[in-house]
Each structure stands twice: as structure tokens, then as C-alpha cells.
Amino acid sequence: MEGALSSDRYNDRGGSSSRGGGGGSNDHYGSSSHRRGGGGRGGGRGRGGRGYNNNNRHRHHPYRRDDHGGGRYGGGGGRRHNDRNDGGGGRRGGGRHHGGNNNRGPRQPANRFTTETKSVDPQYAMMKQLTAMVAKMGDLGGAAEVAATMGGDENNSEAAVVMMRPVVKAIGMNVSDLVEVLCGPQNAQLFLKFGDDESATTTTTANNDDNNEEANEGGDIAAMNLNDGEAKEENDVKVINATKQAGTLSTLLVSCAYGLPLQTPSYAALTLGVDVKAPKETHAGFAGRCVDLAMRCLGRDLDMALECRVASGVGAHAKGDDGITIGENDKDNVRCLAERTGGCGNGNQIDAYYRAKFLLRYLAYLTKIGIVAVEDGGDQSFLGLLQMLAQAATNAAHASANSNDEKKRALGRASRVLASLILSVLPYAMNNANDGGEKGLSSDTISDLVDVIESNVVGQASNYSSDYDPGSGPLSILLKGELDDAPLAGEMEEEEEDEDDDEEEDGDQPAPCADTLQDLLRTVRKLVSSSSSTRFALLGDSPWLALTMDAQSSSMEEQEKVPMEYSGEQLVLDLVGGEEDRCKSVPYLLSIDNADDSVEIICRSLDGVVFGRLAIFDAPSDGGDDDEEDEEDAEETNPNLESYTKSYSLGDRFFLADAIRDVLMCHRPMVSDAGADRNNAKEVAEQVWSISHLFLGADSGDDSSSKGIEFGIIETLISLIVQCTPQGSGMPSSSPLNEHVYLSRVLLELTKLKPSLIPQAIVLAVSGMFEDFMPSLTTTARDNLGHWLSFHLTNTDYQWPKSYWEHWAPYADIDQRNSRGDFVAVALWSMATLSPEGPETVARECLPAGTSLVQSVFLNHKRSNVDVSSTETDLINRIWDTSEDPDSIRQHIISDELLESYGSTIRSIDDNVDNSMSQPKVWWRTRLATRALFHPVSRENTRMISLAEKAWKKKASADGDNDMEDEHPAEDGRDETEDILADLSDAIARFKPVLLAAVARDADAYDSEATGKVDDDKLLMAGEVSILSEIGSLVSAWDSTAIFSLIECLMKNQIVSSLAVATWALCDNADESTNVSPQWWKVVSLAVNKAITDALSKVESSSTDLGGGIGMIIDDGGANDGVDSTEADVNRLDEALKAAVPILKYSLERACHLLSTTNSPKKIPIAAADLVEGMKRLSRAALFQLSSLALSPSPTLTLSNLQRGLMSIDADGEKLASACQAVECDGEQEKKLLQHVAFSVEKLF
């Protein structure tokens, strides 16, 4: 998001913080010593770590943060950039910008004598201070510290102030002090300028920009222009300098209001204070200027959130992309282009949605103060604005009903975006006791709005189906039922006894609340109907009640102070702005039946707006029959967990999770186009924890109001982690809140911030998910959880209770696959990938002594000890030791001499198997050459497994003695600087003729002996599959990076085709789904990407090739501008579809066939769940790749063009869904799964 994104960004902390340091601390998870000490917390903005591991050895790790001592940006030197850019004790004690208080600024020119002088404009410096004060005014962390030192205000007779929470009272005092400063006789002329008076300040700022490299770090938007003329010719555009009209303070206030979600009440209070206190003669109407600017921004952001496109000549563009002109001074505060268009190309949309959400919240607070008209303004009142948005959402939902047309489906998504915005602001607009129950919207009014949305957009009466619906949703987190896990010994009878009860309960379950939009609707409905209350204090916080003004009196004595009230005329909300045309999307939706084609809504996705819902901990008790049992078990539970499950209602939990998501979004680290970066995971963690100050106690004066809140924080973060974009999927994160590493780092920093609370909550959350949720999680959700746990343990010295590993081991030990065993294996494999020593580190430092997990997870997956023949040894030596010429090796591999020397080995295998072309003996030369070429992979695998086994046995025999480091065998001859993947990449390109010759020779031999006609294409593909199969047997099961890299290299060198990769991934020569890897779809996604890339490359090369291989650029004088470019774009899309669709169709058909062969009468086979999840993810990845590679470069093509292209080759959603449903199967469970696949595919395409 743009503008003020983080309160910490503006806080010039200066000096050093002395927290941290000293001796060690207790183990995070309740074990023995933490082995930590020393290394106090650094100063400055980054403030370093908490003294972690300063005495421990550290190995470099690509994901581990090593911020020891000083902060990321500066310890001991204040904020990241002071006026001299001095830095401090930054990263690893040295600082990113000069470490250790050396007070050396940026290097100056060598000539010490210069005629130039650097000066800092006092006026501009003062504005920077203003920015810092406004941004930190309502910071909860700072206000809580002040509130802790405040006593009761016994002299204040106002009941509202006396009953106000101490944190809110402290914020009110901050606002009051700031108002006095801003509106003082000497300062008003400087701070409250607007209109024509603003030009002088802007000019001065621009002239001093070169002398102040970091002048605008505080978020000043000093040159923001809103342009409403996108649909007009360039010379007719009417440019409105909204910032100049509103003034710098109004602009800063509004940007903070839509960028700092936890401080919105304080900005509403500041609006009131400045409006009342400002000199009436010269600076009246401050609130009006703020509201007018907020409405301009709201109109812009609604258009961007709905991705409103306005026709302009031949092409079209998204309204809002050029609707704001940002001056040079603000470039450091705007996210870089990669972030704005990141993810699935909807970065701008997500940011705009959140800005609109917080602007509506700001207007709701102004309504409760009395500044904005509640209902009296008609269509331009706050209620009128919400009713207008609700009607627009209703119209969009009706227009999209039961349609597979992409344009109409986009309207359906737009209706849900608007519904989410309306529902999000309603709790903040309700009148409450603090306002005397007279201001804000009444319960009946809000109930009417909720009825409209529930009936038409989101509720059960509408056509809304969540993408997160268990089983059938394309992005589902949970399955529709449980996996048919292989039980442990002695558990079979218990599982069978419980099964009948589960079936009886299934019929009584209400419709699932699968996503946050459904949860929001439920929460608001309960809140309005008074069937539920909430302790979430932000809904009712009113810091403006602490503001006072002089009472109207003619007495000469000291005037009495009375509560500040707004006395002006209530303001109206003009969203459209007449000729200014602030918003195009909402008027278009209001008249959609009669609208023309000049405006189009292309809302592509709800990613970043709607998230899946996963409740990890028990819901609050409803007074049922199980209360007595809960009370009996209470003594055994964690008291904080008990407090969370009992005292936090479903409404409390929703508001907590929503606030966490807001903070994660708005305070996330950013990089601007100018190269400036903001925020880090540590600061985000601090902001997340500050939410603990937003909950009321059960009783007045309750000091433990936030007790147990850490469980709600962990519940929210883990629910986001399990729905992250999978690693290796070929897709970027669809939104910032789907970035696995970002969320993992924030959770890691929370562990450091609250070491006595967060680690225990993490342990109980993971334990609860392992016991209760694992059989119900999708494959992706389970893998995401395992990858996060490995990241977390790797960065916390593998601290995890020994008892949990012992409890988990039996699930990984059994031969049959089960969800819990898979989770443990994924976590340990991922840890091995994150360590340079691989599984040895896991065996030595992570797992307890004597555990069977090393054997079952690592050692059981090693290759069986097969004697290497002398022929293979000779070939390995010729390739890797003597670097023999590839041509001589090629001649050797196809020679008859090789057949004579290797013949006995050929005849000894597969003697009783039919002569199918897929049998290993057919491709013996190909497999021999592959094993020799990829020998380094096999050697490294054997070496690492051997080291892991030695470490495991030594630890078991020595009972945890960990001095294993110097006992690595020296005789393995491994060069420490060796890069196996890089060496193999070079070798594959060099020895490509050897592999191709081996495939051709084996194919000729088979063709000469086969009876009947042989399909040459299938035969060569079988040879390519044999190469992939051999490589798959060589690479370790835990090393997914290696297998993906090698496959990509083989496709790049055109040794194997994309379709061959898909064929191998789905085990085309096998009849059972159990042989298919859970990661099959990632391999196929890689193949689809390569096929599309190659197809587009051929199109581009053919457009300039004159037939002889000579490219020429022809200048046609612009005669075909706008025509040839469109045709070229369509041609690119057609070629991309021709390349990708055959692979996609084959994969879906093959996966559905394998799915039909599974057989489980009641529960879901784990292999079937892998196939269903893979088909959903592959479809989503293929659509993204087609869109990003073939559509995004074009200014004219949209998703509608892609949909029409798919229809032209019978690959649209309806046709693909029909193909899935046409697969015959006998089992009822399999039929349901095929229906789920068909529903998801049709919804995606």
C-alpha cells in the first residue's frame, strides 16, 4: 500500500535500546537451557535481535536471519536514515549503512573544497517532524506504555472520560497535545495551509529535493493529483490537484487513515480537534477538506479494487493506474512496480481494496462524531453511500448469475468485493454506549443492509459458493471427509466403532463457514441481532471524547473546559463528484442494464480479499451437555488456552483475525522504485502484538483482558500459512498474505518478542492439528504446515519437545502411507533441504537420540545396494574422470561390443514380463547412460545418507554426545567447493548426443523385434520417460529441488519433451494411483510452462525470420499500428494454447482414470486426495502461466480472450468438467471425488 504504511517508519527512536543482553533464558518450549546469552538488543529502528545465539556457531543458511546484536538498519545510530545517513550497528552488528557508531556518512567527493553547500530547509524539516508525530499519535504500543504510568483522572467529571480505557485516554491526550501545537497562533499558518497557500511550500520542497535524499521518508504525499479524464482526449483532461486543495496536513491525515488500520479512531479525533481549534478566519473547514480528499481517494480505490477498465481509443486501460500523479518527493513511499503488479497481477487491486476498507472505516468514525451526515444527506449521507454500494453489489451479482461468461463472472467477483467492504465497516458504524446510543447507524438500519447482502450476494439464498468449500472448492483447505489413513497397531477397532457415529453427525452439520467473507457475514449478523457481543474495543474506542474546548461564557474568570463537539454543518459524501467523475465503477454497476461498453469490470480474483477459514482451537462453550467434561479437563489444559477458548467468542476471534490480516497487509516490508525499503518482520510482529491492547476484560478494570490472545494470533497465522501458494508450484504468491516466507518470518519474530507465550501456543497448535486436523487437510495444506515447521525449527536451533517426536515416530514408521506420517516426513525432508549437511544435521541436532525417524524417513529411502557393473564403472570414469570426448562415448554406447559385454545383465532382468515398450530392459542403453551421466547425484545421495546414519548411531550410543563435526570421512574425496547441480547442467548439455543416441539405438532394437506396427512417437516418448524414471530413482526423496532442476535442464536441452514429463509424473505405465507422487502436479506445471515458453519463442523468432535465418526489422511507417499488434497478440495466445492444452488435457484425463481405480467404501484414499488436489492446483497454475506469458504482454487481450480461445479447442470449463464426469468408476467415494474435480475445473476455466 502507498502512503503511511507503518507507524514505526516515522518514529525517530534515536539512541540505543538496552533491552536484551545478559545471560541465557529458558528454552522456548519448556526444555532445558536455551543456550543463549549476551548480545543485547541493538538500538535504532531495526533494534536487532534479542541476544540470540551470539555464542553459538552458525552455518550460513539461505532462509536464516542472522541479525545479531544490532538491528537490520542501525543499532546505536537512531532510525535507519538520519540527516547524515549515519547508520549504526546494523546487520550483524555492522549496520547496513555503516556500522558501529563510526559516524561516517555517505562517501563524499574526493575534493574537499567545493562551492556547493548542503542546507536543510527548516520549514521542510518541521513538516517531517509533523509527519512523524501524526503517524505515531495513535500507536497502541506507545500509548500502552504511557497508560501504564497514568493514574485515574479523579478530577475529570465527565463520565465518558472516566470510563474510557487507559490506552484510549492516552491516545486522546496525544491528539489533544498535537491539536494545540498545530492550531497555535504561530503554527497554523505553517501546518494548516491549503489551496493557493500550499504552492509556496510545495515549491520549496521541490527545490530542496536534491539536498535531502531521504527527505520524504515520512510518507508526505506532496504532489498527488487525481486525474479524472481517462476517457477523454489528452488535451481535454481536467487535472485536479487534490493535495493542493486539501492541504498537506489533510493529505497526511488521510494517507495515515487508510494506511494504519489500528489508529483510525485517533485520526478521526484529530480531524475533529483541528477543525474546531483552527482559526476560523483563515483555516476553517478542515474536516470538509479531509472528507473531500477521502472521497476522491475512495472513488479511485473502488475503481482499482474492482479493476474498472475504461475504453480509450483502440485499447483500454485500468482506471486508477494513471489516476494519481506522484511527485519526485514521494517515490520512496510507493511500492515498486514488481509489488504493485505482483502475485497474479493483482497487487494494485489488493492494495486498493484495503485502502477503500480503511477509508470507509474513517468515514464511519466521522459519522459517529457528528461530522458526516448519517441519514439526513440522502444519497450523499453515510447511509446513502452504503446503500449505493449495496445496490451496486446486488446488480453485479444478478448480472453474473448462472453464467460461464468471463465478463459476467467478473461481475460476480466484484459484487463480493463490494459486499466485503460494506460488511467490514458496519460494526464500526453502529451506535454504541460511548456515543450515548444516538450517533452512528441503528441496528435496524444495519440489519436491512445485511439482509440485502445476504439475500443477493453472499448468503445461502444467493448463488455464492466459496472457493474454500471443503472438498469441492478450488482452494479448499479441508477435505469433504477424512482420509483413509493406515491405522497404527491396535487402533483398527476403535476407528471402525467411531465411523458410524461420524456418519450420523454429518447429516446434522450446517453449511460450512469456509471463508472469511462468510465468517464476516455471520459475525455482523450476530452482532446486529444482539445475540452476541464482542470484547473487541476498536469498534467503540472514542478518543475524541478526551478532547476539550473552552465553554461559551462571558465571565472574566478562567473558562470551564467542556467536551469538544463539532458545531458545523454536517458534511455529505459525494462519491461521483459531478463532472469530476471520481468513480466510474459504481455508477456503471448501478445502471448496468442500460450501460454501454465504455466501462468494463474485469475483477480477476478474490485473492487477498477473501481467505480460507480454519479454526484450530475449540469454539466457545454453548452451555451444552459437554460442559462438565470440559471443566474436568480444564485442570490439565494450559490456563491461557483455556482463557482463549472460553472468553473469546466467535465474534472476538473474527475481529482479532481480521485485525491481524490488516496489520500483515499494511505493515508488510516494501521496496520502492527508488530503492528505499520500509519495515521488517520484527516490526510487523510488534504491530501484531499491539493488537492485544484492543480487547476489553470480562469485568471492568480487568488487567488480564488479553490473556490467551497468543493462541488467537497463532491460529490466524497458521491458518494463513496452510493456504499459502505451494513452494515449487510455478506460481508467485497470489497476495502478500499468501507468502510463505513472510508469514514464517513474522511468526519467528513473534517467538523472539514473546518467548514465554508464543512458543507454547505454537506447540499446542501443532499438536492439536496433528491429532484432530491432519486426516482432514488437503495435501497442499499438510505440506505447507510441514514446510513452515521445518523453517521455524531450523531458525530456533531445532527446539521442539522430545515427547512429540516420540509420539509422531510410529506414524512415520508404518509401511503404508498416512497423513500424519506424510506430515512428519515432509517436515524432516524440508529441514534436510534447508541444511548444507542435509539429513545429517537433522539426525544430529534435531531428532532425539535413538529415534526411529531417521531410519523410516531417510534410511529406508536410500537405494538398495546394487553392484555396479564394470561396464557402468568404465562409462562413469570416461564421463567424469577422464572427460572423454562425447562423440567417442556416443560411438561406444551404440556399439555391438557394449551388447556383448552387458548382455548377461540384460537377460537377467524382467524375464517374465511381456515385451511392452515401457519395460526397463527395452531401454537398457538409455538407463546405463543416464546412470553414468547422473552418477554425482547418486554418489552424493549415498554420502549424505551414510553420514546421517553414522550421526544417528553415534548419538544413540553416546546418548546425545554431539561432537561429530570433525569425524566426516575424508576418504570420500568430495570437494567442498563442488556444485553438483551446476556441474550436471554443463554435463547434460555436453553429453546430450550420448543420451539421444542411446534412446535411438534402443528404439531401433525394439522396433526390429516387435510384432506389428509401432508408433514411433510413443516409442521415443517411452525412451524419454525411461530417462526420467532412472533419474527419479537416483535423487533422494527429500531433495525436490534437485529433481525439479534436473528435469528443467533436460527440457531446456530438448532431451525430453514436456508431454514426456507429464507422462512420467503420472506413471502412465502403471495402473495404480499409489505409485504417483503427491508432487506430480508441480512437475507437470513445470512442463506446461516450458511448452508455453517454447511456443512463444517460436512465434517471436518466426516474425523476424525471412526464411534463411536472417532477422530483419521492417519499418512500415506505422501503417499497421493497432491492427497487426492485435493480430500478433491473438496469434501468440493461439500458439500458447496449442502447446499447453494437450498436456493439460492428458494430465486431467490420466489423473481421473487413476482416481477411478482407487477403492475405499467410506473414507478418502490418500492417493486419491493427492490426485484431486493436484488437478485443482495444476489447472490454476496452467491458467496463471497462460495469463502471465500470453496475455499480460498484450494491452488489449483479457481473460475473456483466453476463455474464447479455450472454447475454440474444446478446453473450456464445461468441456473439461464433462470429461472428468465421463470417467466410469464403481465406488461412491470415487464418484464424489470426480464431481469435486469437475466442479473446481469448471469454476476455474
Image (spheres, grey):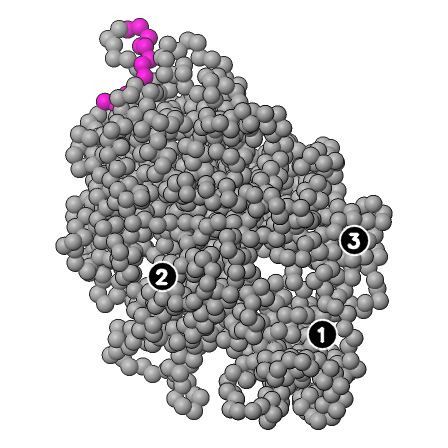
Image-quadrant location for residue 290: top left
- Given residues 955 and 1128, the one toward you in this image is 955
Badge 1 or badge 2: first in the primary sequence: 1
**Foreground tag (3 vs 2):** 2
Disc 3 marks a residue whose amino acid type is Trp
Residue 603 picture quarter? bottom left
**Which stretch appears magenta?**
556-567
Question: Where is mark 1, residue-wise?
Answer: 935
Q: Which x, y percent locates residue 558?
A: 33, 8
Marks 1 and 3 sit apart, C-alpha to C-alpha, by: 26 Å
- Residue on which the image places disc 3: 952
Against 1036, residue 601 (above or below) is above
> According to the image, label 2 marks what residue?
1242
- The answer to whether residue 1169 is left or right of residue 386 is right
Contact flag, marks 1 and 3 (Cβ < 8 Å):
no
Q: Earlier in the sequence, mark 1 or mark 3?
A: 1
Spatial CA span between label 1 and label 2: 45 Å
Three-letter residue code for mark 2: Glu
x and y percentages locating residue 1242 in the rendered image: 36, 61
Residue at the image point whose x is 67% and y is 37% from the top: 29
The nearer-to-camera label among 1 and 2 is 2
Magenta-drawn stretch contains 562: yes
Q: Is residue 596 visible?
A: yes
Tell me the element at label 3.
Answer: helix
